[in-house]
Image: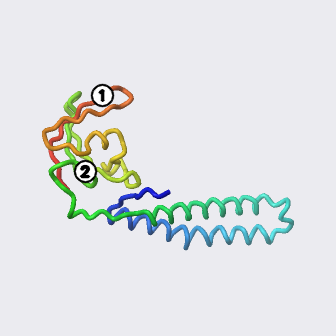
Amino acid sequence: MSQFSYYTEEGLKKLKDEIQHLKSVERPRITAQIAEARDKGDLSENAEYDAAKEAQGMLEARIAKMNTILANARLIDESQVDDSRAFILSRVRIKNLNNNAELEYRLVAENEANLAEKKISVDSPIGKGLLGKEVGEIAEVKVPAGIIKFEILEINR
C-alpha cells in the first residue's frame, strides 16, 4: 500500500490516538485473556484460548494495517488551500437543483468522512463532482438514481 492518505491535523491525531489505544489497552487486555485461558488446562480443547489467540491475531493485523496507513499519511497544510475552487478541506455550500435544498459539506479524505459531521469524501460521487468547481458552476453528479445537479453557492475554509 503505497498510496498516500491525506489528513487534517485533527484526523491525524485521531489516527495516532487509535493506534495508541490498540497498543496500550486492547493488546494487554487480549494478552490477559490468553493467560487466563492458558491457566485453565489442556489447550487442545480450550475454546477460550483459541478465541483469544484469534482475537490477538486480528488485533495485530489491525495495528499493522493502521501503522502502514500512518506511515503513508500526509498532513494537509490548510493555509495552502485555494478558496477559489472546491478542493480537499474546502467547505462548500451547494444547492440541489432538483429540489432546491441547500447543503453545506466539508470535503475531506476518505478516512475522515463522516456524514453526521457534514464531512464527505473527495472520493464519493458528490465529492468527485464538486472537486475543482468554482462558485456559480453546476456540478453534475451521477448517482444510482440518475444525475443530480448541484450549483456551487459558496466555497471557503
Q: In this view, does 137 lie above or below 56?
A: above
Q: Is residue 125 above or below residue 109?
A: above
Q: Which of marks 2 and 1 is in front?
A: 2
Q: In this view, does 35 lie above or below 84?
A: below
Of the residues under marks 2 and 1, which one precedes in the sequence?
2
**Residue at which label 2 appears:** 87
**Residue at which label 1 appears:** 147
Q: Which x, y percent locates residue 102?
A: 20, 38
The residue located at (21%, 58%) in the rendering is 81
The residue located at (45%, 68%) in the rendering is 17
- Nearer to us in this view, 20 or 29: 20
Colour option used: rainbow
**Left or right for 28, reference 152:** right
Q: Which x, y percent locates residue 36?
A: 74, 70
Secondary element under disc 1, as helix, strand or loop, is strand
Kind of residue indicated by mark 1: Ile
Q: Quadrant of the C terminus?
A: bottom left
Crowding at dot 1, Cα within 10 Å, few <14 / some 14-19 / many 20+, comes out as: few
The quadrant holding residue 4 is bottom left
The residue located at (78%, 58%) in the rendering is 47
Secondary element under disc 2, as helix, strand or loop, is loop
